[in-house]
Amino acid sequence: MQVAVRRMRADEWEAARAACIDAFDEPGIPELLDILHSSWGWDDELAFVAARGDEVVALVLFTPCFVDAPDRVVPVLVLSPVGVCRRLQRQGVGDALVRFALAELERTRPEPAVFLEGIPSYYPRFGFRPGAELGFAPPSPRIPAAAFMVYPLPAYDASVRGNLVYADAFWRADAVGLRE
Ligand SMILES: CC(C)(COP(=O)(O)OP(=O)(O)OC[C@H]1O[C@@H](n2cnc3c(N)ncnc32)[C@H](O)[C@@H]1OP(=O)(O)O)[C@@H](O)C(=O)NCCC(=O)NCCS
């Protein structure tokens, strides 16, 4: 599947939002996207899309969060959500988009790590590792250990460890972990 992967332009938000909502088809996703988009941490530099011609077909967002390390508070990033419109799933679009976004973050960002909670079988291909392996704890006990993953960026060193603290947007959207 030939797609262009790049940073999102500000005028592409509605199309990118629609692609991501289509990807999940879950009731909480529109609210999460809207809260993230209007939150203090929103940064156009942290939104990436895949496009087929003029059509935006996938979106991945990163949000500034924190690690409560023993000696300081460390700004980090959280990947959430990533979605490929349903008709183009499983054709390599998500793979290309996430790889591009991580490479751009490696090149440009000061944060030492990217975290996510997600499908344990999908993200290791990009270099994500279980958070506990590097001394991180999830922001909620409702996140299964296998789903809590971290991707170290160039600024990472072993002094960065501790609890991940999510930005308020994830709590306001009740988009943390699994509910009963
Ligand atoms: C998950 C998602 C972003 C992956 O993007 P995609 O373009 O469909 O996936 P790709 O074609 O790049 O997948 C590459 C590989 O991941 C695997 N994969 C894709 N979706 C998967 C899933 N939900 N669970 C496990 N593996 C998955 C594919 O089988 C493929 O493996 P292969 O290369 O060995 O065949 C996309 O399917 C999607 O939007 N899903 C709905 C929303 C969602 O679940 N988002 C992620 C929440 S953590």
Image: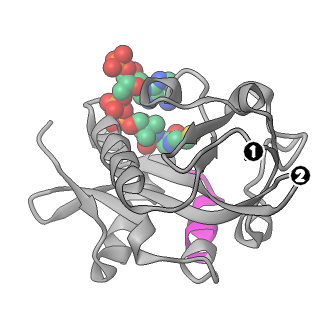
Q: Nearer the viewer, residue 149 or 157?
A: 157
Callout 1 touching callout 2 (CB < 8 Å): yes
Using the image, tell me which numbered label, if any, was put on residue 41.
none
Check the image and name the residue furthest to the top: 121
Residue 32's x, y, as percent? Answer: 63, 66
Secondary structure category for the residue under label 2 = loop
Cα distance between the residues tagged 1 and 2: 8 Å
Name the spot of residue 70 as percent of width and height, x first.
89, 52
Q: Judge whether residue 29 is colored magenta.
A: yes
Direction from residue 137 to residue 1 in the image, left or right: left
List the residue tagged with mark 1.
159
Question: Label 2: how many residues lie within 10 Å, few (<14), some (14-19) or many (20+)?
Answer: few
Q: Circle 1 sits in a helix, a strand or a loop, which is it? A: loop
Main SS class of the magenta portion in the image: helix
Residue at the image position 48 percent from the left and 77 percent from the top = 43
Image quadrant in which the N terminus is located:
top left
Horizontal relation, residue 104 to residue 78: left or right: left
Q: Who is closer to the viewer here, 143 or 111?
A: 111
The disc labelled 2 sits on which kind of residue? Pro
Mark 1, other Cα within 10 Å: few <14 / some 14–19 / many ≥20? few
Q: Nearer the viewer, residue 163 or 145?
A: 163
Residue drawn where x is 75% and y is 44% of the image? 159
Q: Looking at the image, is mark 1 or mark 2 earlier in the sequence?
A: 2
* Residue lying at 30% horizontally and 47% vertically, measured from the top left: 100
Tell me where residue 90 appears, x and y as whole percent: 32, 29
Residue hosting label 2 = 70
Q: Quadrant of residue 118?
A: top right
The magenta-colored residue range is 25-34
> Quadrant location of ligand 1?
top left
